[in-house]
Image (cartoon, helix red, strand yellow):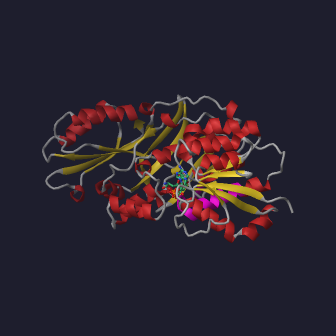
C-alpha cells in the first residue's frame, strides 16, 4: 500500500470538528477508496482545551496555524478557520509555497486572494481545492472546472447562502421573526462568524465571484459585484410576492451581456412554479446555462458541519488519489496567469422585470400619476395591483410589476414618483429573475 497522506487541519469549529470525526469514523473505507490511509497528524485552533466532541490528543497541536503550515510534516494543509486575511492567508501561502497541497472552504479568502494563491499552487505543481467554498456540499466547482470544459457558459446563478435561504423560508412560513431565524441559523452552524456577511449578501458575493471566474475564465472581481442583502425584506414583501405568484430568494447572478459581465447579488422574485422557488431552508441551488449541455441545476445542503465536511473530504480524497509528479489541472479551470481581465457591465444597463411596492396616501390621482411616470420612462407594466389585503393601516399599498426594462429607467421613474409627495414609506424595488426551466 502507498504511504499515508499526512493531513494538517487548521480550524476545528463547525466544519473542522466534523471533518476530524468523519476522517476517524470512515478511516478504513477511505483507505480502500484512496488506496492509502488518510492520517490527520497535526491540528490548530485558538483554544487547545475546548470540548469539540472529538479527541485531538493523537495529533500534534499548533497554537499558530502558520507554524503548522510551515513546519508540520504534512502533505496537505486544510484551512478551515475563515477570514479573508491572516492567519488563513499566510498559512495557505506558506503551505503552497513549500509544495504542500491545500484545501480550503474559505470563500472570503479566495474571493480576495484566489488568483495569487492559484498562481503559487500552479507554479509549485500542487493542488488548491475549494469545493466547500461555494454552495457547501454541492459539487459545483468540480462541475464547472472539469465536467463543463468546452461549454460556453452564458449565465450562472443560484441560492448560495444557506443562512439567508433559511431565514426567508422561515419568515414565509410565518413562524419566526428575522432575528429569531438568524439566531437559529447560527445555532445550527450555518452562519458566518460575523452573520452580517450572510444577511448583507457578502458571503453570496464571495461565492459568486469564484463562480464567475470559473464560468467566464476571468480574473476574480469581487469588488465589482452589485450587492443588496435581505435585511430590508419585510413580511409585506413576502406576502405580496406570494399573492402575485412569486417567492423571494437571495440570488447571486453572473451573466454575459453585450457590454461585459454582470455580477449581482440581491433579493429576487422568482416565479413560484420555477424549480429554484421550491428550494427551501439551508438548501442551496446553482443553475448554469451552458451551450453544449443546456441548463444544469444542482441543489443540496449549502451549509452545516457535515455537509461542508463532505465536500472537504472529497477534495482531500482527490489529492490522495492523484499520482505523484503528475501535472495537476489549473485551480480556476484556466491557468491563473491566463485568466482574462474582468470587464464589468454597468448595473444601470441591467435589463429585467421589476416588482415595485409603494405605500401611498389614499387620495385621488395616485394611479394616474404612477402611470404617467412609468410611461415617461418608457416602462411597460405587466400588472398594477391594489388589494385591501396589502393595505397598511390607513395607507394603501400599490404593487407594480414591469415587463423587461432597463434598471436606469426604473431608477428614474421611482425617483420621480418619490418626488411627488404621496409616498408614506420608502419604495421597495425587487428585481425579477426568469430562471428558464430552473
Ligand atoms: P467556526 O466554527 O467559526 O470555526 C473556526 C475555527 O477556526 C475554530 O476552531 C477556531 O478556533 C479556529 N480559528 C480561528 N482563528 C484562528 C486562529 N487565529 N488561529 C487558530 N485557529 C483559529 O467556522 P466554520 O463554520 O467551521 O467555518 C470554517 C470555514 O468554512 C470558513 O471559511 C467558512 O466560511 C467556511 N464554511 C463554513 C460552512 C458552514 O456551514 N459552517 C460552510 C461552507 C464553508 P477555536 O475553536 O479555538 O475558536
Ligand atoms: N454562512 C454560509 C451559509 C456557510 O449560510 O451559506 C456556507 O458557505
In depth, the one of 391 and 189 nearer the eye is: 189
- At 56% from the left and 56% from the top, the residue drawn is 45
Left or right, 266 with reference to 135: left
- At 27% from the left and 33% from the top, the residue drawn is 415
- At 48% from the left and 47% from the top, the residue drawn is 203
Q: Is residue 140 above or below residue 377?
A: below
In depth, the one of 183 and 245 nearer the eye is: 183
Magenta stretch encompasses residue 210: no
Q: Is residue 21 above or below residue 156?
A: below
Please identify the quadrant where the N terminus is shown: bottom right
| Number of residue marks | 0
Quadrant assignment, res 173:
bottom left
Q: Which residues are magenta?
A: 296-316
Left or right, 314 with reference to 272: right
Res. 69 in view: yes
Quadrant assignment, res 91:
top right
In depth, the one of 70 and 346 nearer the eye is: 70
Magenta stretch encompasses residue 315: yes
Q: Position of residue 115 (x, y in %)?
A: 63, 36
Q: Position of residue 31 (x, y in %)?
A: 78, 65
Q: Position of residue 405 (x, y in %)?
A: 40, 36
Please identify the quadrant where the C terminus is shown: bottom right
- At 54% from the left and 58% from the top, the residue drawn is 302
Amino acid at each position: 500500500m502507498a504511504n499515508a497522506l499526512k493531513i494538517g487541519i487548521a480550524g476545528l469549529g463547525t466544519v473542522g470538528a466534523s471533518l476530524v470525526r468523519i476522517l476517524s469514523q470512515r478511516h478504513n473505507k477511505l483507505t480502500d477508496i484512496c488506496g492509502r490511509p488518510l492520517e490527520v497528524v497535526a491540528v490548530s485552533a485558538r483554544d487547545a482545551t475546548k470540548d469539540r466532541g472529538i479527541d485531538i490528543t493523537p495529533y500534534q497541536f499548533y497554537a499558530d496555524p502558520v507554524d503548522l503550515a510551515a513546519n508540520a510534516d504534512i502533505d496537505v494543509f486544510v484551512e478551515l478557520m475563515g477570514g479573508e486575511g491572516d492567519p488563513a492567508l499566510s498559512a495557505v501561502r506558506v503551505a503552497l509555497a513549500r509544495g504542500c497541497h491545500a484545501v480550503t472552504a474559505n470563500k472570503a479568502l479566495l474571493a480576495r486572494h484566489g488568483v495569487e494563491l492559484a498562481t503559487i499552487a500552479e507554479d509549485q505543481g500542487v493542488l488548491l481545492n475549494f469545493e466547500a467554498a461555494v454552495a457547501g456540499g454541492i459539487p459545483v466547482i468540480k462541475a464547472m472546472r472539469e465536467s463543463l470544459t468546452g461549454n460556453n457558459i452564458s449565465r450562472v446563478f443560484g441560492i448560495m447562502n444557506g443562512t439567508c435561504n433559511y431565514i426567508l423560508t422561515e419568515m414565509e412560513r410565518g413562524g419566526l421573526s428575522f432575528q429569531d431565524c438568524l439566531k437559529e441559523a447560527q445555532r445550527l452552524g450555518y452562519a458566518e462568524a460575523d452573520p452580517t456577511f450572510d444577511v448583507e449578501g457578502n458571503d453570496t458575493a464571495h461565492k459568486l465571484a469564484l463562480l464567475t471566474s470559473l464560468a467566464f475564465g476571468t480574473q476574480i472581481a469581487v469588488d465589482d459585484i452589485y450587492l443588496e442583502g435581505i435585511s430590508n425584506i419585510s413580511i409585506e414583501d413576502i406576502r405580496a410576492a406570494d399573492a402575485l405568484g412569486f417567492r423571494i430568494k437571495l440570488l447571486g447572478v453572473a451573466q454575459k451581456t453585450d457590454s461585459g459581465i454582470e455580477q449581482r447579488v440581491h433579493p429576487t422574485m422568482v416565479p413560484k412554479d420555477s424549480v429554484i422557488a421550491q428550494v427551501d431552508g439551508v438548501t442551496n441551488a446553482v443553475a448554469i446555462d451552458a451551450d453544449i449541455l443546456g441548463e444544469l441545476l444542482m441543489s443540496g445542503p449549502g451549509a452545516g458541519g457535515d455537509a461542508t465536511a463532505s465536500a472537504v473530504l472529497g477534495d482531500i480524497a482527490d489529492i490522495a488519489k492523484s499520482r505523484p509528479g503528475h501535472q495537476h489541472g489549473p485551480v480556476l479551470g484556466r491557468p491563473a496567469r491566463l485568466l482574462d481581465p474582468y470587464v464589468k457591465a454597468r448595473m444601470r444597463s441591467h435589463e429585467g422585470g421589476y416588482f415595485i411596492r409603494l405605500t401611498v396616501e389614499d387620495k385621488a390621482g395616485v394611479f394616474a400619476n404612477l402611470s404617467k411616470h412609468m410611461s415617461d420612462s418608457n416602462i411597460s407594466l405587466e400588472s398594477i395591483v391594489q388589494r385591501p389585503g396589502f393595505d397598511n393601516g390607513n395607507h394603501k399599498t400599490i404593487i407594480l410589476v414591469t415587463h423587461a426594462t432597463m434598471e436606469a429607467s426604473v431608477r428614474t421613474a421611482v425617483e420621480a414618483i418619490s418626488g411627488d409627495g404621496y409616498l408614506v414609506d420608502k419604495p421597495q424595488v425587487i428585481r425579477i429573475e426568469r430562471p428558464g426551466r430552473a
